[in-house]
Amino acid sequence: MIALLAGAAMSFESPDLPDLPREFRGAWVATVANIDWPSRPGLGADAQKSELDALLHELAGLKFNAVVLQVRTSGDALYRSGREPSSWFLTGSQGDDIGWDPLARAVQVGHRLGLEVHAWFNPFRAGHPSQKGGYCEDHMSVARPDWVKRYGKYLWCDPGIPEVRTHALAVMTDVVQRYDIDGVHIDDYFYPYPEGGAAFPDGASYAAYVQGGGTLRKSDWRRENVDGFVETLYRSVKSVKPWVKVGISPFGIYRPNVPVGIEAGVDQYEELAADARKWLREGWCDYMAPQLYWRTDSTKQNFGRLLSWWRSENVKGRHLWPGLYTSLVGPETKKWSPDEVVRQLGLIRKGAQGSDPGEIHFSASSLKVSKLAEDLKKGPYASTAAVPETSWVKGQVPVRPRASAERHRVTWDVPEGTRFFEVWKRTDGAWTLVRIGSGPSEVWPAGCDALAVRAVSREGRTGPSTVVVRPKAG
């Protein structure tokens, strides 16, 4: 039964509130090399805040419901960390006090706007060539040079060193403990992509493994290191906050000729030590976002065939939300038209087969292309979608909010476990959505005679509605 509040004898039938479509609509916000935010290193705190707020508002305005914010690019931090130094891409001088907390602000503003916030970590990269300033004394390349190897233009932590894996896990679980995030996200950089035919210099750590009695060949040993890291990450996050989603974004082709006829310039299984198929089949993630960065009409790397293959491997029924190379749209690249992205969204929805669709766009700045934004707003993102429920994670359905009404505003409490509220208005007998967000109050919308409020849990479960009748004037 639906609670009815305000005017004395006023009552009506239970509201026929529509079920919102479920679709994960995410955007990667890359901070490395200042791709998406902030616009340059060393920007003042006020300007950094303004840019971040504007970006989040833009995504919400396009009816996105999630942001995947890069908070660790290379052994650094774009948040307040006691474990690693501030990022050069934020401060312009690695290790300087950032003066505010970008992740805390992203969570606060994002949740108010109805955006989930996922913290994106690069687990093993230690240095990026676009960093023009030096590394501070607290950075691992200086404090723990035994962990770090130069490979091509980059610095990398050696995943074969157990302390390296332990440190990366501690950094991520620390963020889970201290921030009200919705997800932990890791990208495709496990062992590095091959550079110039050179071998990754992990001979010493492999020798230590063999001397300790290990018998695996090097490529199998590398995969065991990464497999253990991924499994431990999933179990660690769930032990701290079960509702926090763990997402992985691997290279979009599992292996060359898988499925038959698919070509790839890299074998991630052998060269990156990434057995992403195993992680999905074992359920060591809540969502897999393979980077399907190819066209729908490609023959050698066909978007639709790859999407179908990944879905066929999803035996645990986890979320399968592919990454889209939306950055190829625009006058700078001249490679894709907005129609290509719209076609990919159509294939994602068509092939969902009873599960909730979703996707993540790389990257946020590409959505500023006006024609693409217009096509999304009037086409696939014309109406609001709710984040899909993570049904395999235990949690309670939120209880009905308790509300009160005044002439100008409705307020309600926040049931335990609530992430968002759906706020609906009734006008001329029809219910329409006002917003999804975290705020526990709403100014009476003009022209409506009632509001309905229902809570949405952190796992995506929707609770029962509370209906509030507008008080009569006088």
Image: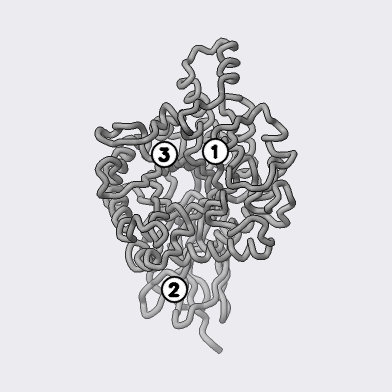
Where does label 3 land, which residue? 251
> Does the residue at mark 3 contact the one at mark 1 (Cβ under 8 Å)?
no
Rendered image: mark on residue 238: 1
Say whether residue 144 is left or right of residue 404: right
Name the outermost residue toward the bottom. 474
Residue 161, placed above or below residue 450: above
Q: Nearer the viewer, residue 96 or 228?
A: 96
Task: Identify the disc placed on residue 124.
Answer: none
Task: Identify whether 326 is placed above or below 198.
Answer: below
Mark 3 or mark 1, which has the lower sequence index?
1
User: Which type of secondary structure does the marked residue at label 1 adopt?
Assistant: helix
Q: Nearer the viewer, residue 274 or 448?
A: 274
Mark 1–mark 2 Cα distance, whole angstroms, equals: 37 Å
Under mark 1, the amino acid is Lys
| Residue 370 in the image: above or below residue 275 | below
Q: Nearer the viewer, residue 361 or 57?
A: 361
Q: Position of residue 354 (x, y in %)?
A: 30, 48
Q: Which quadrant is the N terminus positioned in? A: bottom left
Residue 103 drawn above or below residue 196? below
Answer few, some or many: residues within 10 Å of disc 1's Cα (few below 14, many 20 plus, some between 14 and 19): some
Residue drawn where x is 59% and y is 63% of the image: 51
Quadrant, the C terminus: bottom right
Give the residue displayed 29% in from the left and 32% down from the top. Answer: 257
Residue 236 in view of the camera: yes
Which element type, helix, strand or loop, lies under badge 2? strand
How far apart marks 3 and 1 lie (CA) works out to: 25 Å
According to the picture, the residue beneath numbered tag 2 turns out to be 425
